[in-house]
C-alpha cells in the first residue's frame, strides 16, 4: 500500500488498533478478528517478541485492504527494518527527528509521539504526517480541541486513555484518528480463543468513530 493510500485509510477509518501482546501464535487471529469488525489499520509494536519478523510474516497472509504498521519505533535503524518488512506506517512514542527523516526518505507515513505544543509543532515542521499525542490519558479531548484552535490543520492521533466508549469524543474534539489497544483487545477473550468478542468490540468502536466523523 503506497503512502497516499495509507494516509487516506488512517484518516477515513479514524482508528489504529495497537497490538501489544506476548503470544505471537495468536497474533494473526487477533488481527483478523479486529479487521473483521471494521478496524483495518493495525499497529504491531516492537514490544511483540520478534516483532520485525512477525511483521513480515503477518503482512504476507493478510488481505491487501489491511494497513499494517509498526509501533514503538525509537531509532532510525528499527525504522528501516520495519519498512523493509512491509510496514506502511511507522509510529513512535517519542519525537526523534532521525526516525522522521528515514520515513520521509522511504516515502512511508510517520507518526512521532509528542506531548507538548512545542514538540508537536517541531514534529510537523520536520515533516510528520500525523502526530501521536502520547500519553493522552491525563490530557483529555479538550487538549486536542485547544490545540486545533491556533493550529487547525494539525493531524493528531491521541493514544493512551482512549477507550471504545470515549473514542468518539476525541474525534469530535478534532483528532484525525485514535490509537487504541488495551480496551479493544480483551485479554480474557484472546486467552480463551473467543475472537468473536474482539470482532464485536472492534465493530462497536468503528461505529462510534464513524458517528463522530458524521457517518451513519
Image (cartoon, rainbow, N blue to C red):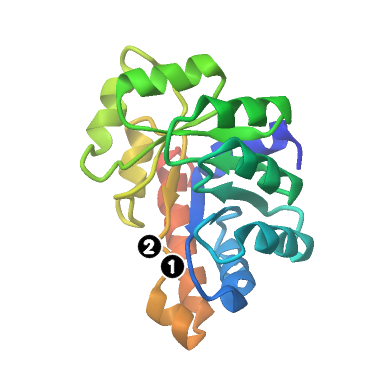
Residue at 35%, 40% (x, y): give it. Answer: 134
Q: Nearer the viewer, residue 148 or 125?
A: 125
Residue 108 is drawn in which quadrant? top right
- Where 208 sits versus 4, above or below? below
Are the two marked residues, 1 and 2, in contact with CB atoms closer than 8 angstroms?
yes
Q: Which residue is mark 1?
A: 185
Q: Looking at the picture, how far across and down is residue 200, in whole percent? A: 47, 70
Residue 31 is drawn in which quadrant? bottom right
Q: Which residue is mark 2?
A: 182
Residue at 56%, 66% (x, y): give it. Answer: 49
- Where 132 sits versus 154, above or below? below
Q: Is residue 42 left or right of residue 200?
A: right
**SS class of the residue under badge 1?**
loop
The N terminus appears in which quarter of the rendering? Answer: top right
Q: Looking at the picture, how far across and down is residue 77, in whole percent? A: 63, 40
Q: Looking at the picture, how far across and down is residue 63, in whole percent? A: 75, 60
Mark 1 and mark 2: Cα distance apart in space: 5 Å
**SS class of the residue under badge 2?**
loop
Q: Mark 1, residues whose alpha carbon is within 10 Å: few (<14), some, or many (≥20)? A: many
* Disc ID at residue 12: none
Query: Is residue 78 something one can see in this rendering?
Result: yes
Residue at far left of view: 138
Amino acid at each position: 500500500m503506497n503512502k497516499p493510500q495509507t494516509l487516506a485509510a488512517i484518516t477515513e477509518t479514524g482508528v489504529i488498533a495497537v497490538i501489544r501482546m506476548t503470544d505471537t501464535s495468536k497474533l494473526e487471529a487477533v488481527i483478523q478478528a479486529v479487521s473483521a469488525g471494521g478496524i483495518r489499520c493495525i499497529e504491531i509494536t516492537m514490544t511483540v517478541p520478534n516483532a520485525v519478523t512477525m511483521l513480515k510474516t503477518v503482512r504476507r497472509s493478510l488481505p491487501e485492504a489491511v494497513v499494517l504498521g509498526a509501533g514503538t519505533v525509537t531509532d532510525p535503524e528499527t525504522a528501516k527494518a520495519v519498512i523493509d518488512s512491509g510496514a506502511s506506517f511507522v509510529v513512535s512514542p517519542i519525537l526523534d527527528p532521525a526516525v522522521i527523516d528515514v520515513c520521509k526518505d522511504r516515502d512511508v507515513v510517520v507518526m512521532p509521539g509528542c506531548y507538548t505544543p512545542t514538540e508537536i509543532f517541531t514534529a510537523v515542521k520536520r515533516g510528520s504526517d500525523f502526530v501521536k499525542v502520547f500519553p493522552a490519558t491525563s490530557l483529555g479531548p479538550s487538549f486536542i480541541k485547544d490545540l486545533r484552535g491556533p493550529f487547525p490543520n494539525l493531524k493528531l492521533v491521541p493514544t493512551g486513555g482512549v477507550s471504545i466508549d470515549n473514542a468518539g469524543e476525541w474525534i469530535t474534539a478534532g483528532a484525525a484518528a485514535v490509537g487504541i489497544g488495551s480496551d479493544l483487545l480483551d485479554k480474557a477473550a484472546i486467552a480463551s480463543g473467543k475472537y468473536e468478542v474482539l470482532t464485536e468490540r472492534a465493530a462497536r468502536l468503528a461505529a462510534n468513530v464513524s458517528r463522530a466523523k458524521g457517518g451513519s
